[in-house]
Image: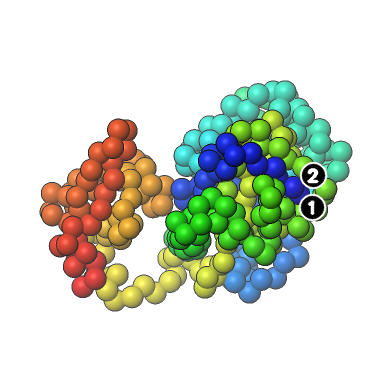
Amino acid sequence: MLRIYFSGEDILRTRVAPTADPVWELILSLHLLQGRDRDPLTLMWRRAVTRDLRQDAASDQLRLLFALNPPRGYFPDFLTPYASVDGFEAGLDAVCSTPKTRLQRDMAVLAAATPLPASAAALARGDTVALRQFADSMEQYRALAISPYWGQIQAAVAADRTRRARALLDGGVEGLLTSLRPAMRWEDGVLEVRDYPHSRELHLDGRGLLLVPSFFCASTPVALLDPALTPVLVYPVDRLGGLASDNSATPGAASEALAALLGRTRAAVLQASGDGCTTGEVARRLNISAAAASQHATVLRNAGLLVSQRDRNTVLHTLTPLGQAVLEA
């Protein structure tokens, strides 16, 4: 069991990640792909990714990535940096910038339990070329296994965030933490993860906790091993209808018509703004650059479909009545 100890300050600093974390989803999907789980909601995804990996002539480059992510047990903390809350590129940059001491420590812990290929030695030394090649393998795998399904992953995480937001509004942070049952239990300032594979205690010490809802997280929530790192707890969400490639899905006629009118990305920006969304959130949800998100929002605002309000360094976009009518038409 994992026991996480909160002070009053920790409760105030606990929050939910703003969107699906692309690096956590990538890493946890590797565990799921190699494991024995046969969840029917991910079966089509597993078959498609396995087939594409076999057909990909460059798949040998992924050997180290898979080796560092066994289906069970420890995987290195440096693979899922806190910076990934700001998007995939930020997370990838953080992986490539991992201090050598952390690389050596994490790789030594993994090597004690899992056989590693010879290429792992250069990564453990912090070799710049090895780190860049490893980052390239993450990008390669992401393009094959994550990006085609990103819309469904985001939708499942967004639905969970709505559920947690309601719990937070109704009961404060303690209501939020209580809503994590049955996988976790909140009582007397302690959050217990019941089926955690090891007996551990994590004292937040005023740092708060980042809760990361995840599509590919298995039934048991995941925490980083190193207690000195920013505290993160990744937990599973309902997988809704499961995964099918966005390219093979048949969207509704209304969505197709809106995309034909505005363009697919611009229509997606309009839909993302339905409950209010900042430029950064739009970029993360749609996997586009912040500059592109801002440009599309400007076009929609000039057409009278969005209204944008600046608050310090962020811009919040919401639908106008006309934008709502267009979305619902």
| Foreground of the two, 240 or 138 | 240
Instruction: For residue 262, say whether it is visible.
Output: yes
| Foreground of the two, 148 or 229 | 229
In the rendered image, residue 299, in percent from the top left (x then y), is placed at: 18, 49
Q: Is residue 240 left or right of residue 232?
A: left
Please give the residue where the numbered disc 2 appears in the rendered image: 200
For the residue marked with disc 2, what is the amino acid?
Arg
Dot 1 crowding, Cα within 10 Å, few <14, some 14–19, many 20+: some
Dot 2 crowding, Cα within 10 Å, few <14, some 14–19, many 20+: few
For the residue marked with disc 1, what is the amino acid?
Met
**Which mark, by number, is residue 168?**
none
**In the image, residue 183 above or below residue 133:** below
The image quadrant that residue 268 belongs to is bottom left
In the rendered image, residue 93, in percent from the top left (x then y), is placed at: 53, 32
User: Residue at the spot x=28%, y=41% of the render?
Assistant: 315
User: Residue at the spot x=24%, y=66% of the render?
Assistant: 327
Q: In 3D space, how far apart are the residues under numbered discs 2 and 1 (Cα atoms)?
A: 6 Å
* Mark sitting earlier along the chain (2/1): 1
User: Element under label 2?
Assistant: strand
In the orientation shown, which residue stands out farthest toward the left? Answer: 303
In the rendered image, residue 183, in percent from the top left (x then y), is placed at: 68, 61
Instruction: For residue 165, say whether it is visible.
Output: no
Quadrant of the image containing the C terminus: bottom left
**Residues at discs 2 and 1 in contact (Cβ within 8 Å):** yes
Q: How many marks?
A: 2
Please give the residue where the numbered disc 1 appears in the rendered image: 1
